[in-house]
Image (tube, grey):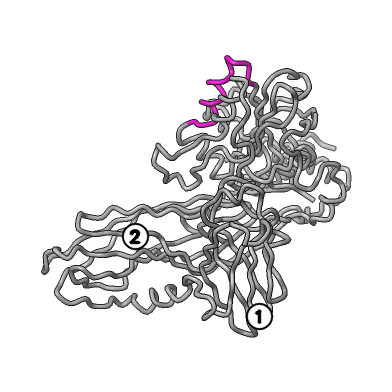
Amino acid sequence: MKTNHRMMSLSAALLAAMAIAAGSVIAGEPSKGDKGAAPAAKAGGNEASPKGVKIGDKAPDFTLKDTNGKEVKLSSYTGKIVVLEWFNDDCPVVKQAHEDKSTMVNIASEFAPKGVVWIAIDSTNTKHANYGVNKDTVKSWGMDYPVLQDPDGKVGHAYGATNTPHMFIIGKDGKLAYKGAIDNDQRHEKPAAERVNYVKQALNQLTNGETVTEPETRAYGCTVKYGS
Amino acid sequence: MSALRLRFLSLCIAFAMFALGGLATSRANAAPPDGNKLVKFKLVTSASVLAPGQQGWLGVVFDIEPGWHIYWRNPGDSGVAPGVTFDAPSGVTIGEAQWPTPERHVSEGLVDFIYTGKTMLLFPVTLDSGAKVGGSLTISAHVSWMVCQNVCVGGEGDGKLSLSIASQSKPSPDSPLVDRFLALVPKPLKSPADSVAASWNAGALILKAPGAQQITWMPYEYESVPRGPVDILNDGVSATGELRVPYGAAAKEEPMIRGVVQVRRKDQTTSYVVEVPPKSS
């Protein structure tokens, strides 16, 4: 399924073959990362509060690499509104948000002319079955914004990202202005009149210089696949 | 070393690399789990024959692969509740889903409300009193779900069932199964008859069940964080007969705080639907 997984596996096989040639022993990797992490490691090693950044707090800076190896530094967008979308292209809820009505890409392109920067972040740990971003998928979803790799989950924990998708909006002042769900319709059953896209609502308010009226909603979706 | 042996050796290495590559590829490329195989569903009904004006039950039975789970109406910190949409002819009224009490499941500091094994969503179905006796009707449903273990996958499908209309209702062979799951749907709390009391005090929901070994609070779905419980991980369960669940500052704007309380007394566990207006008393 995952093209780049295949590439990685082939390189791994090559490395393995080289290791055999060098007389090394290859042991099976225990899959301890698969079943979930020990919470103690998370709580202890986290500078931010266990729940992550709060509304009105300064958004933690980070530098992460995108799928092409290019570094992206949050503070290089100082003065702009930045949307962070926690991402995992294998999560059915992420798929839905990208495939059903191209929700993410449509909002990103609607607000790009107003100077809004959109960044996806994947905090899946390297041992998880969902690890890796399928470039073909990202392309087929029309995502022309970067997907940053956060395999050790540092950035995810600093923000308190718990779900995919989990949405964060940073205001022009560098402070967190929104945290939560993409919309209020997780079962996709609400009539159009009752449907609220929280991210769109917050971006409309922020780009008009208004206060975000619903700054903290409950994210829904898969868990972020953090490692230990 | 002869040229032939060298060629043989390089062939062997090439083969080993190919084999290893194949192994590694198949591991990483193992097809993602199929949500339609991990969860099987079927539509059942309490009555194969329904009389005009009578109410029966439609059930969506989910059979879930061991080790995997699907979600309650409020999935909790992750997950998505299953969705069921019916297509029924006129003269048939299908009511709101009734959800059996779920299990509270904690993993990596996140609280989810889940179903494992087998569960059923139940929907009251009523025939118009003017429905024509002697006919039959077909109800179809589209069912979708998210099923998770270490990874999550989606699944969906369509089902349908027929009901005959006669002057006298008749139970279907699935009626005992429907009854079994109806018994797991929490009933509205009636204090003091149920020996459980729910009240609101100083921004918190207070649940009291004297003599209980455990009280668990499972709030219905909510969207605004400041309107929900502050910390369902630490405040959602008590090991005594009293549970205090602090709510966010905006909870008082809600007309009613709703959810299910589960009370364990010795070897008996009972659940009730609780509705409390968030006004300090």
The magenta stretch spans residue A104: yes
Q: Chain of mark 2?
A: B
Q: Is residue A225 above or below residue A84?
A: below
Q: Residue at x 79, y 48 (%)?
A: A50
Q: Is residue B20 left or right of residue B74?
A: right
Q: Is residue A37 left or right of residue B259?
A: right
Q: Mark 2 — residue?
A: B95
Q: Which residues are magenta?
A: A102-116
- Image quarter of the N terminus of chain B: top right
Coordinates of residue A220 in the picture (x, y in percent): 58, 46
Q: What predominant SS class does the magenta segment belong to?
A: helix
Mark 2 neighbour class, 10 Å CA radius: few under 14, some 14 to 19, many 20 or more: few
Residue type of the residue flagged with mark 1:
Pro
Q: From where the camera sits, is residue A80 visible?
A: yes
The magenta stretch spans residue A158: no
Q: Mark 1 — residue?
A: B210
